[in-house]
Image (cartoon, rainbow, N blue to C red):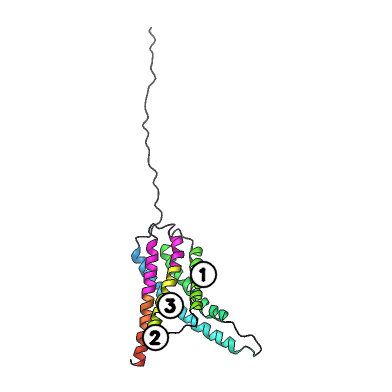
């Protein structure tokens, strides 16, 4: 009987390669409308908080100063500036930053976002106010320009610090800086600049 030679079967097993699906990082750069809305809301809330706290700190500071004994050393200008302006600024910026974080928070550490924004913003406010002392306004135009400078400077500082965190998760994080500066400087100058001037003119009848 002849021996049958069996050749090995060359079966080529098809190899299927399924490309791995990479989840895109959270990108809120298209949520421009949401960014604008939250900045407007944060502006209103922070101004309200700041005004209430400044009035409260002035009353507390005045009561403490009036109760001091004649032999007690006078309170330094730096301490009064920190207490009356610094504390309200920190709290109001912290609250505004918390609202802002609510729309960009995915992938961003909340503590870092809030602490950096409030700290840098408060230092910027105190440095700016101290640099401008004594603050006087020879004309209403000078007051409006001061308001414009203040909001432009502080919003630039805070938005830059926030951009350092936002760029980690958002492709077009630079839009955040433009929106921040535009909203805060524009509304701030319009409301706290032009609005107060209009109110003063209406009261004086001019």
Q: Quadrant of the N terminus?
A: top left
Q: Does residue 53 belong to the magenta stretch?
A: no
Query: Could you tell me how far apart the alpha carbons at marks 1 and 3 are, in whole angstroms?
Result: 17 Å
Q: Does residue 176 belong to the magenta stretch?
A: yes
Tell me the residue at 33%/66% (across/down).
33
Label 1 or label 3, whichever lies nearer to me, is 1
SS assignment at label 2: loop
**Residue that protrudes farthest toward the top in the picture:** 1
Tell me the residue at 35%/89% (across/down).
201
Residue 197 image point, x, y percent: 37, 85
Is residue 158 shown to the viewer in this render? yes
Residue 189 image point, x, y percent: 37, 77
Asked if residue 113 is positioned above or below residue 147 in the image, the reply reads above
Q: Quadrant of the C terminus?
A: bottom left
Please say if the residues under marks 3 and 2 sit with CB atoms less than 8 Å apart: no
Identify the residue under disc 3: 47
Identify the residue under disc 2: 139
SS assignment at label 1: helix
Identify the residue under disc 1: 119
**Left or right relative to 15: residue 161:** right
The segment highlighted magenta reads 158-186
């Amino acid at each position: 009987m002849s021996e049958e030679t069996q050749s090995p079967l060359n079966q080529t097993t098809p190899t299927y390669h399924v490309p791995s699906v990479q989840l895109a990082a959270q990108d809120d750069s298209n949520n421009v409308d949401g960014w604008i809305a939250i900045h407007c809301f944060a502006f209103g809330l922070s101004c309200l908080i700041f005004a209430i706290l400044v009035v409260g700190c002035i009353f507390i500071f005045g009561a403490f100063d009036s109760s001091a004994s004649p032999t007690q050393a006078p309170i330094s200008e730096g301490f009064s500036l920190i207490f009356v302006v610094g504390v309200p600024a920190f709290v109001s910026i912290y609250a505004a930053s918390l609202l802002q974080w609510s729309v960009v928070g995915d992938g961003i550490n909340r503590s870092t976002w809030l602490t950096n924004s409030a700290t840098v913003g408060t230092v910027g406010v105190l440095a700016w106010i101290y640099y401008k002392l004594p603050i006087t306004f020879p004309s209403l135009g000078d007051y409006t320009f001061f308001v414009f400078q203040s909001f432009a400077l502080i919003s630039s500082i805070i938005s830059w610090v926030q951009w350092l965190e936002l760029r980690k998760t958002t492709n077009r994080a630079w839009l955040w800086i433009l929106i921040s500066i535009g909203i805060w400087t524009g509304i701030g100058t319009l409301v706290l600049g032009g609005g107060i001037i209009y109110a003063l003119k209406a009261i004086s009848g001019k």
